[in-house]
Image (tube, rainbow, N blue to C red):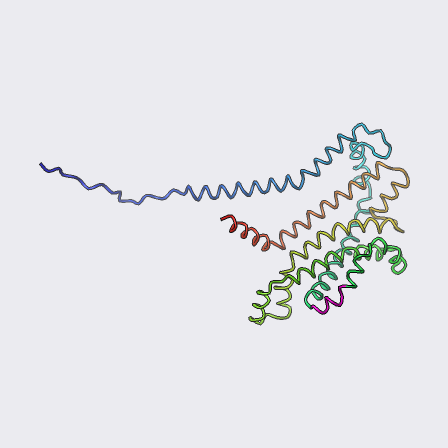
Amino acid sequence: MSVRTEPARQDSQPVAKRPSRQRSGVGRRITATLGRALWWTAAVFGLPFGLLALWWVLSADSQTFYLPPLSEILASFDDVWLRSDRLRADVLPSLLRLAAGFLLAVVVGVGLGVLIGSFRRVRAFCEPVLEFLRAVPPPVLVPVLMLFAGFGNTMKVLVVLSGCVWPILLNTVEGVRAVDEVLTETCRCYGIRGPARLWHLVVRSASPQIVTGLRQALSVGIILMVISEMFAANNGLGYTITQFQRTFAVTDMWTGILLLGLLGFLLAMLLRLFERSALRWYFGLRQSQRDDGQR
């Protein structure tokens, strides 16, 4: 007796693949992006707010005239800076002087840094002079600059320039010296010379080091901006804070110090946004290298 077997039925329509892997991959990327955003927010704002909270708690019962409670400082902040004309009369001139000195330092530092870093003989010739000038503290030059530039805005811009130029210059020199030799030979083989080689090879290769110099120069520039305004000035943040100190308006003096720190924080954030935009290729390259190393 023979048993008749029927062939297995096959569906006429193909079975569609479930996009579970694709969805899970997109979900992981979104989760990772949100996690990095939360970590960046906590890293940037966590410590400042934590220090302010600690300051608030420790100074709550302060009876010292020179260290008033943070609650009194914040209460006076609005009247001293926001409801008065000091933002236009003091803060704006300080920021303009800082911007002028900083931009001049960028032009001089990057220009001379590319020149010195590109030629070995020029670097050997200028290195002793650069080391000597870098060792001179910029605040020491304030009386000298007052003799030659007077007491106006020119002196204050030159003071900021004299301090900001060195981090930018030295980092640019090191960045130019570290240009990849393979890329240099590739440009030579393809005949890329002149301004195209200078911009696309030298400056772009040295740009991470240049931005590092910009971050260092910004903090130095803020300090020198305040110092320059403490000598023979009639406006500016440094001048106003000094006047508060001389008239024993201690709470108002602390509001100026708090405003100075807030401006420094905001300027650092703006510089970081510029860094992320200008060096997007650099951070992408580092991320791809880390991903390759984890595989």
> Does residue 36 show up?
yes
Give the overall secondary structure of the magenta segment: helix
Q: Quadrant of the N terminus?
A: top left
Closer to us: 171 or 165: 171
Closer to us: 72 or 193: 193
Q: Quadrant of residue 163?
A: bottom right
Q: Residue at x 68, y 50 (%)?
A: 271
Where in the figure is residue 13, as x and y percent of width and height? Answer: 29, 44
**What residue occupies the far left of the structure in this picture?**
1
> Does residue 93 show up?
no
Q: Residue at x 50, y 42 (%)?
A: 28
Left or right of 288, for residue 105: right
Where in the figure is residue 277, as x and y percent of width and height? Answer: 62, 53
Left or right of 180, for residue 261: right
Left or right of 86, for residue 281: left
Left or right of 161, for residue 34: left
Give, as a single range, the part of the protein colored magenta: 120-127
Q: Residue at x 72, y 44 (%)?
A: 265
Above or below 276: residue 148: below
Where in the figure is residue 220, as x and y percent of width and height? Answer: 77, 51
What is the count of numbered marks? 0
Where in the figure is residue 63, as x and y percent of width and height? Answer: 84, 29
Q: Quadrant of residue 205?
A: bottom right
Q: Residue at x 58, y 68 (%)?
A: 185
Q: Is residue 234 magenta?
A: no
Q: Quadrant of residue 87?
A: top right
Q: Is residue 126 magenta?
A: yes
